[in-house]
Amino acid sequence: MDDQAWHAKSIEILTDIKAWRQAHPTATFVEIEEEVHTRLMELEAHVLQDAAAASKRRAWGQSTDTLAPLCPTCSVPLQARGKRERTLHGNGGQSVTLSRTYGICPKCGSGLFPPR
């Protein structure tokens, strides 16, 4: 996300929180806190997804600049097998989808979606 998109997403979340509060005028402090936390977890998921997407290691095997990760079992460089998507869940339960190069170990045949 660029700066404008981040600004827009932040404003959207703050607007949603204000709208929720207006719709729930008798909400307790704990209920308000839970709603704010839920909305901020949405922002956290976007931050995590963007930070992971900025990693140079996500596209290994496409250039000579980035070395292939090693198989955790054999310590042999993996062979790239194209991009795949993987959906993870953050601490707040929000889904984060990452697009990374998937690899196969030429020695043991294990497939791996490297974490970095």
Image (cartoon, rainbow, N blue to C red):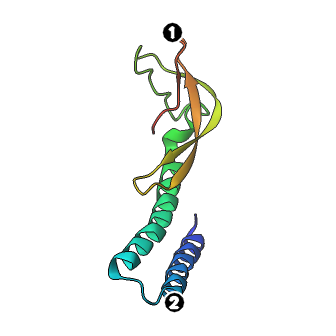
Q: Which mark is residue 22?
A: 2
Q: Residues within 10 Å of mark 1 (few under 14, many from 20)?
A: few
Residue closest to the eye, 36 or 53: 36
> Percent position (x, y) of residue 109?
55, 13
Which quarter of the picture shows residue 64? Answer: top right
**Kind of residue at badge 2:** Gln
Judge whether 39 appears above or below 56 on screen: below
The x and y percentages for residue 92 are 42, 57
Please tell me whether mark 1 or mark 2 is closer to you in this view.
2
Would you say the residues marked 1 and 2 are in contact, meaning their CB atoms lie under 8 Å apart? no
Q: Is residue 103 above or below residue 98?
A: above
Identity of the residue furthest to the right in this view: 82
Amino acid marked by disc 1: Lys
Q: Position of residue 82 (x, y in %)?
A: 66, 31
Q: Secondary structure at mark 2?
A: helix
Split into 4 quadrants, where in the image is the C terminus? top left
Q: Nearer the viewer, residue 25 or 17?
A: 25
**Mark identifier at residue 107:** 1
Residue for point 50% across, 10% down: 108
Helix, strand or loop under label 1:
loop
Q: Nearer the viewer, residue 9 or 95?
A: 95
* Mark 2 residue crowding within 10 angstroms, few (<14) / some (14–19) / many (20+): few
Q: Tell me where residue 76 appears, x and y as whole percent.
A: 45, 16
